[in-house]
Amino acid sequence: MIAESLKSMFADEWDRYVNHEFVRKMRSGDLPLDNFKFYLVQDSLYVNEMLKAVMRSSELLPNDMALRILSAVILGRDKGMETHAFLEKELNVVESNRMTMTTYSYTRHLRYASTVGWPQFLAAWIPCMWGYSEVGKAVSDSPNMYYRAWAEFYASSEYAERVSVILEAMDRFNGDVTEIKDYFLISLKFEQMFWQASLDMESPI
């Protein structure tokens, strides 16, 4: 499995991502709500740009693969956005269109990958989609009701099925893994930075 190979190749970076302090504090319930609200705003901005990159890269994908991925993402987005909307309402989150430098840089990385080729884009996208499945399971038993609600979607079998579509698509790549490994690694680092930016409440640009 290509994704497993990439994950093993950068096991330490993966661990720093899925076990980041932000994740650990969500799981323990010790994360201040202000940090979580900050995260929700930036995550919404990220998702909007991510979906644009998915649409752009779909033009490079084989037709059957593009159809499966787009269907999975659209279905997944509805449920995910419902969860986001619930949390934003409950927590009185004020939306903003101002990205942090971390969010801006990460989304530009995805945008660039979506213009290079479908293997490069999938390698750049997988850390987000696959990693959140692990994070969701880790946070699902948090004593904080809001963090549990957030995690429920990512820990669900429905979300896991959608991730599997993307992982299966990655397995269609029959080239040299060295051609795509940097896209995967850069996204892993950005995921860590994204958590940290929410802990630090990084100033928007």
Image: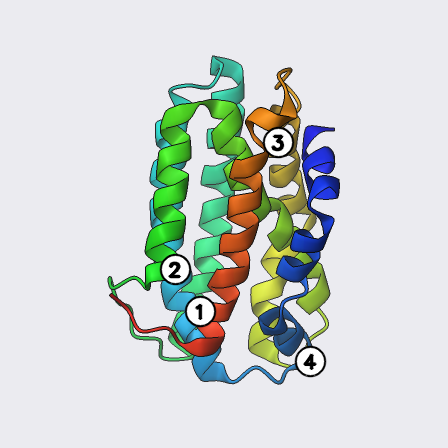
Q: Residue at x 40, y 73 (%)?
A: 38
- Label annotation for residue 197: 1
Name the residue that disc number 4 marks: 28
Task: Give the CA separation, mark 2 to mark 4.
Answer: 25 Å
| Camera-side mark, 1 or 4 | 1
Whichever of callouts 2 and 4 sits on the residue coming sooner in the sequence is 4
Q: Residue at x 62, y 59 (%)?
A: 17
- Label annotation for residue 133: none
| Camera-side mark, 2 or 4 | 2
Q: Amino acid at mark 4?
A: Ser
Q: Amino acid at mark 2?
A: Thr
Residue 171 in picture, x, y percent from top left: 66, 23
Residues marked 2 and 4 touching at CB (< 8 Å): no
Q: Which element is circle 3 on? A: helix
Q: Amino acid at mark 3?
A: Val
Residue 185 in picture, x, y percent from top left: 57, 44
| Camera-side mark, 2 or 3 | 2
Packing grade of label 3 (10 A; few <14, some 14-19, many >=20) is some
Task: Give the CA separation, mark 1 to mark 2.
Answer: 7 Å
Task: Give the CA separation, mark 2 to mark 3.
Answer: 28 Å
Task: Give the CA separation, mark 3 to mark 1.
Answer: 30 Å
**Vertical order, 196 against 76 (above or below):** below
Using the image as rendered, state which of residue 68 and residue 78 is in the foreground: 68
- Label annotation for residue 102: 2
Residues marked 1 and 2 touching at CB (< 8 Å): yes
Q: Quadrant of residue 154?
A: bottom right
Residue 200 in view, yes or no: yes
Q: Residue at x 50, y 29 (%)?
A: 120
**Vertical order, 3 against 194 (above or below):** above
Whichever of callouts 1 and 2 sits on the residue coming sooner in the sequence is 2
Q: Residue at x 58, y 69 (%)?
A: 149
Name the residue that disc number 3 marks: 165
